[in-house]
Image: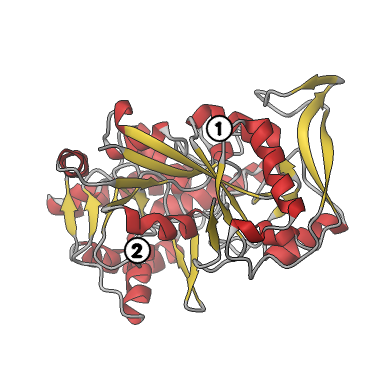
Amino acid sequence: MQVDVLLGLQWGDEGKGKVVDVLTPRYDVITRFQGGPNAGHTLEFNNIKHVLHTIPSGIFRGDKVNVIGNGVVIDPSIFKKEIESLRNIGFELTNNLLISKKAHLILPTHRLLDAASEAAKGASKIGSTLKGIGPTYRDKIGRDGLRIGDILHNFEAKYRARIDQHIEILEKFYNFDYKQALADYEKEWFAGIEVIRQFQLIDSEHFINNQLMAGKSVIAEGAQGTMLDIDFGSYPFVTSSNTIAAGACTGLGIAPDKIGRVYGIFKAYCTRVGSGPFPTELLDETGEKLRRIGNEFGSTTGRPRRCGWLDLVALRYAIMINGVTDLIMMKADVLDSFETIRICTAYLIDGVRTLDFPNDLEGDVVPQYDELEGWQCDLTGVDSETKFPAALSGYIRFIEAYLQVPVTIVSVGPDRSQTIER
């Protein structure tokens, strides 16, 4: 057996949670392999919206095993709120949610360091979610982090030693007022640690590989998107982890030859939250229309998302990096009312036409567009490909011809039932 990977191909917010929920019945084990509560995976069913931040999106499917992998960073206070929210609607996860002992903990001072660092950057700030993700990964790479497994051994002393180091940085380098915020964070944080103790803490790399050897099927759920990858995204306006398919290997402890199908998810247009380059961004009424119809506001931060036309140059790059085998197009219904739809098929960079996504986008980047006819009808009630309007089928064929990868699923609304396989 192999691990199938499902990840975003744009700047995040593509709709990964919904698709994991839809595909979960086909798998025995659902995993998260990177990122933290800066992710917000939104699922809708039975007219109820659910937003997950740390927990894999397979938890609404009953008897499935869900694993938070070693590549994830966990904020106990946010984890506690997630668990309580799910318990309030009848989901008890202590028997089917497993947590890697090697996953790193987001400490209260990581959030404070995140806020202090962002404030110090001023106008050049990254657009952080201020969840402490960057400082936590920085400690991980610097070999100073605390992991879930540390909860089991001399934890208080380890915690206090790291907190004291962080306080010194906050005082000496940032002159940051932290005392009241730290006191507030710590109370909820330690309550979250006690909730984590209720769950099975495992050596996830052994567990997942043993599941594969036993013939179990596994899907790995990514967070954020390819264009936010720490190595291959639009650096430095990126997240702090590897969001690409290769991240599933290091974030779960599986060998490269264990990767099977790679599901790449993209919106029928583009969005981005926070700072950084965005070639097809629309700073006009069309961009505002996409935002309004698509309800494009961050599920974690609530910030309005920047909106633009679909960028096939960036998408082609993301497909190459990830080895995508199946494309999944989300939010096709958001384009229902557009008479004409534009798609970026090349860049002019300082006057030179290219199909390759560049190392940086600091030059004079002008997107080159093809125009397609819009379908101008309501897709939300469509339940099979045979009922697609001709213009939508043409839009999909255009994308497939350019990218040379099939679009196997099309989403025409937020509910799990509004998902059409081709």
Would residue 132 be seen by someone viewing this image from the given angle? yes
Q: Is residue 300 left or right of residue 260?
A: right
Q: Residue at x 33, y 54 (%)?
A: 26
Name the residue at 64% across, 44% down.
Answer: 125
Kind of residue at disc 1: Ile
| 74 relative position to 283: left or right | left
Q: Nearer the viewer, residue 280 or 344?
A: 344
Quarter of the image for residue 235 reads top right
CB under 8 Å between callouts 1 and 2? no
Query: Disc 1 on helix, strand or loop?
Result: helix
* 274 left or right, relative to 327: right
Tally the marks. 2
Which quarter shows the N terminus?
A: top left
- Mark 1 lies on residue: 319
Q: Nearer the viewer, residue 139 or 240?
A: 240
Residue placed farthest to the front in the image?
386
- Give the structural element (helix, strand or loop) at label 2: helix
x and y, in percent, of residue 328 in the image: 55, 47
Question: In which image quadrant can residue 365 be found?
Answer: top right
Residue farthest toward the left in the current orientation of the protein: 153
Image coords of residue 121 (percent x, y): 63, 42
Residue at the spot x=57%, y=33% of the render? 318
CA–CA distance in space, label 1 to label 2: 32 Å
| Residue type, numbered disc 2 | Phe
Residue 370, how many percent across, how many down?
83, 37
Name the disc covering residue 79, or none: 2
Residue 314 visible in the picture = no
Image height of 332 relative to 382, above or below: above
Camera-nearest residue between 37 and 189: 37
The label on residue 296 is: none
Residue 186, percent across and down?
Answer: 34, 64
